[in-house]
Amino acid sequence: MNATTTADAAVTSVGRNIIIDNVTKVFGGDTATPFQALSPVSIDIRPGEFVSIVGPSGCGKSTLMLMVAGLLAKSQGGISIGGQAISKPFTDVGIAFQDHLLLDFRTAMDNVLVQADVRHLDKKEMRERARELFVKLHMEKAIDKYPRQLSGGMRQRVSLIRSIIHDPAVLLMDEPFGALDALTRLQVRADLESLWLQRRPTVMFITHSVEEAVGLSDRILVMSPSPGEIVDEIIVDLPRPRPLAMVESADFAKYADRIYTHFERMGVLHDVGSAHNEE
Ligand SMILES: Nc1ncnc2c1ncn2[C@@H]1O[C@H](COP(=O)(O)OP(=O)(O)OP(=O)(O)O)[C@@H](O)[C@H]1O
């Protein structure tokens, strides 16, 4: 079985490759108390690949992602996306963080269309595409509502639509579902997979949820405690789309157990035996 063996594999990916070459980060390098947040990290991500990064709190996951986005300077090493060296904010990107950051005074649709405004894209075309995505995520009723009139899950889905409406080559997601309740989180995860399968941007996804990582990824990178480095690379060879019930399968459990074993070794989890639970 191959992870991309699905009908959707025929989709031409809009994604671009990401190369992270021996990148490190030291905060306060010019002070008396420099802090090494990241050991040298090297990662090659294929165009259209969905890669998750898991690791203990503070190991440097967000730091790494900010450097890939060009929003934080690296201390050493090189990062390129589609052959373009990253030395300033990269623009062909969609970003989704835990905090959905919707504008209170704009409706859901107008929040999504912020992308058209800042990128000077055809607003009519974007509006049509946004409407299609709202329908796909069963969010038609939210289109003209303001963020305060929406549930947390709906707001996060608006944020998800906003992050991909301009068809970015790269999607950077840092715990995007962290603030959601468990049930909504499952729904939004399924939504993300379905949206990703449509256009196949390259995705870097940070999560604390082992199930989310296995359920979504082509590959999972496990990071060590601070200063983080990659200690395992897990190719997730499960067919897509991945129904939520797949969590019950022996194959799914095999991948999840491998990650939990790392967390136990790192001292992040204690005495959880084989009945691993999501946090
Ligand atoms: N601007 C900064 N100045 C100094 N130290 C920083 C700065 N940003 C992050 N750090 C430190 O770098 C380390 C890595 O932080 P980072 O946010 O990347 O971790 P993380 O793995 O994303 O954590 P979490 O899973 O809790 O979000 C932490 O010890 C953090 O305190």
Image (tube, rainbow, N blue to C red):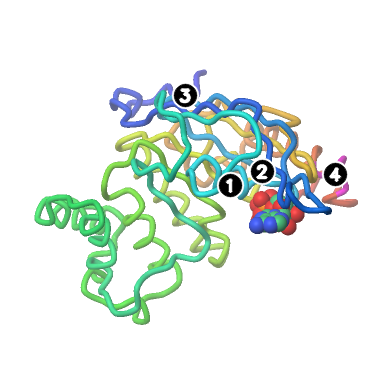
Please tell me which residue is depicted at 40% across the width and 38% down the height of the picture. 170
- The residue closer to the viewer here, 167 or 234, is 167
Mark 1: secondary structure = strand
Q: Tell me the magenta residue range.
A: 263-267
Q: Position of residue 61 (x, y in %)?
A: 64, 46
Mark earlier in primary sequence (4, 1): 1
Left or right: 44 as drawn, with respect to 255: left
Q: Position of residue 193 (x, y in %)?
A: 42, 43
Mark earlier in primary sequence (2, 1): 2
Q: Examine the rendering and report whether any part of residue 19 can be seen.
A: yes
> Which amino acid is tagged 4?
Glu
Dot label at residue 264 = 4
Q: Is residue 155 above or below residue 164?
A: below
Q: Is ligand 1 less than 8 Å from the beta carbon at label 1? A: yes
The span from disc 4 to disc 2 (Cα, nearest Å) is 13 Å
> Which amino acid is tagged 2?
Val
According to the picture, the residue beneath numbered tag 1 turns out to be 206
Dot label at residue 161 = none
- The residue closer to the viewer here, 61 or 81, is 81
Mark 2: secondary structure = strand
Q: Is residue 98 above or below residue 69?
A: below
